[in-house]
């Protein structure tokens, strides 16, 4: 018999975490984070991580599980999340996967082909090559794996490096997605939050200023004080790279805030494009127009989950 699984998706600042808490309280749920940055310890304010005291005693999984220096792929997430979800179900509780990292969610649901692990020595050689000749890695990938190069932006050095790493370690073309093993044993309900555009932009602006007012600059200062260099992956994320640039004298505080807001708006647009894209799972998303913290939206979502669980 298939067990129930609920996912809550949508753009940043749409109220996914608030809605997840409501659903978890109503249906004995446990929350599984699906935000790539919330995995990292110490990165709290800029990721809008729900504080421990605001979690209402509801178990949260895959939060604060990584050191900032640790790399974590979509495949790593898929394996970890599947184990967590199985454990939640075994306890008779409802797993609630919550977050806006679409590629992680797709990896969880559809699986990813078996791939070699990270090779730090190879990565260092590739990094040095890119530093000597910017763009060299994408040109190399274009020569070795044209189809993969066509899918990856030349400036996305992280993805270019990973694609080259796989190609050089295996000596063969990147495996097809059809080689992946989808999640089995669960029936899925996906809830999507899509606030009206102008309201979402206002929410993003308000959240951005609130993050800086609540101490994002000080959070970054403390992370650096405790030994981080600023080159770790979480510092590439929205808010953190701008706060870091401010501390290094490259941006004024107001410039950092404005740059964060602009990039967050662009990111929210990409998220909606991803979740509205053509795939077997995104086609099944039940969309609600509004924020997850809106009482009317929350009640409609609770009703939808109730019907799903009784069906």
Image (spheres, grey):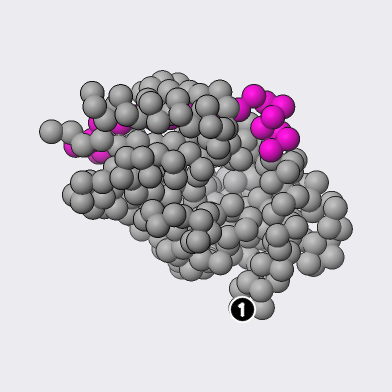
Residue at 51% across / 66% down in the picture?
41
Q: Is residue 110 left or right of residue 301?
A: left
> What residue would you read off at disc 1?
226
Q: Secondary structure at mark 1?
A: loop
Residue 195 drawn at (x, y percent): 60, 27
Residue 89 drawn at (x, y percent): 22, 46
List the single residue furthest toward the left.
Answer: 1
Image quadrant assignment for residue 231: bottom right
The C terminus lies in quadrant: top left
Residue at 85% across / 53% down in the picture?
254
Residue at 46% across / 29% down in the picture?
299
Question: Magenta region: which residues?
Answer: 181-203
Give yes or no for residue 260 being in the magenta stretch.
no
**Between 131 and 22, the one nearer to me in the picture:** 22
**Between 115 and 241, the one nearer to me in the picture:** 241
**Between 126 and 40, the one nearer to me in the picture:** 40
Image quadrant assignment for residue 104: top left
User: Label 1: few (<14), some or many (≥20) within 10 Å?
Assistant: few
Q: Does any portion of residue 268 appear in the rendered image?
A: yes
Number of residue marks: 1
Residue 49 drawn at (x, y percent): 54, 54
List the single residue furthest toward the bottom.
Answer: 226
Quick check: 50 above or below 201?
below
Residue 7 drawn at (x, y percent): 39, 36
**Between 134 and 56, the one nearer to me in the picture:** 56
Q: Does any portion of residue 233 appear in the rendered image?
A: no
The N terminus lies in quadrant: top left
Residue at 46% across / 55% down in the picture?
55
């Amino acid at each position: 018999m298939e067990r129930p699984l609920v996912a809550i998706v949508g753009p940043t600042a749409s109220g996914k975490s608030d809605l997840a808490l409501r659903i978890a309280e109503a249906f004995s749920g446990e929350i599984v984070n699906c935000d790539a940055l919330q995995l990292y310890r110490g990165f709290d304010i800029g990721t809008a991580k729900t504080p421990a005291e605001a979690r209402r005693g509801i178990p949260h999984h895959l939060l604060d599980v990584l050191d900032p220096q640790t790399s974590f792929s979509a495949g790593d997430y898929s394996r970890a999340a599947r184990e967590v979800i199985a454990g939640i179900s075994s306890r008779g509780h409802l797993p609630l996967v919550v977050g806006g990292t679409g590629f992680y969610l797709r990896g969880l649901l559809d699986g990813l082909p078996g791939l070699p692990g990270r090779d730090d020595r190879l990565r260092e050689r590739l990094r040095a090559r890119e530093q000597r000749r910017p763009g060299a890695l994408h040109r190399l990938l274009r020569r070795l794996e044209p189809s993969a190069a066509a899918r990856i932006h030349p400036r996305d050095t992280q993805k270019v490096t990973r694609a080259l790493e796989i190609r050089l370690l295996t000596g063969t073309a990147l495996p097809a997605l059809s080689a992946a093993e989808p999640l089995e044993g669960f029936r899925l309900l996906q809830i999507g939050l899509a606030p009206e555009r102008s309201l979402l932009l206002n929410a993003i602006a308000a959240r951005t200023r609130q993050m800086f007012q609540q101490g994002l600059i000080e959070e970054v200062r403390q992370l650096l004080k405790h030994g981080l260099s600023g080159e770790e992956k979480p510092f590439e994320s929205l808010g953190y790279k701008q706060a870091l640039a401010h501390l290094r004298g490259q941006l004024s505080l107001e410039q950092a805030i404005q740059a964060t807001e602009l990039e967050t708006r662009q990111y929210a647009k990409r998220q909606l494009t991803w979740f509205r894209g053509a795939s077997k799972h995104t086609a099944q998303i039940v969309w609600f127009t509004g924020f997850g913290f809106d009482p009317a939206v929350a009640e409609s979502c609770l009703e939808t989950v109730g019907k799903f669980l009784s069906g």
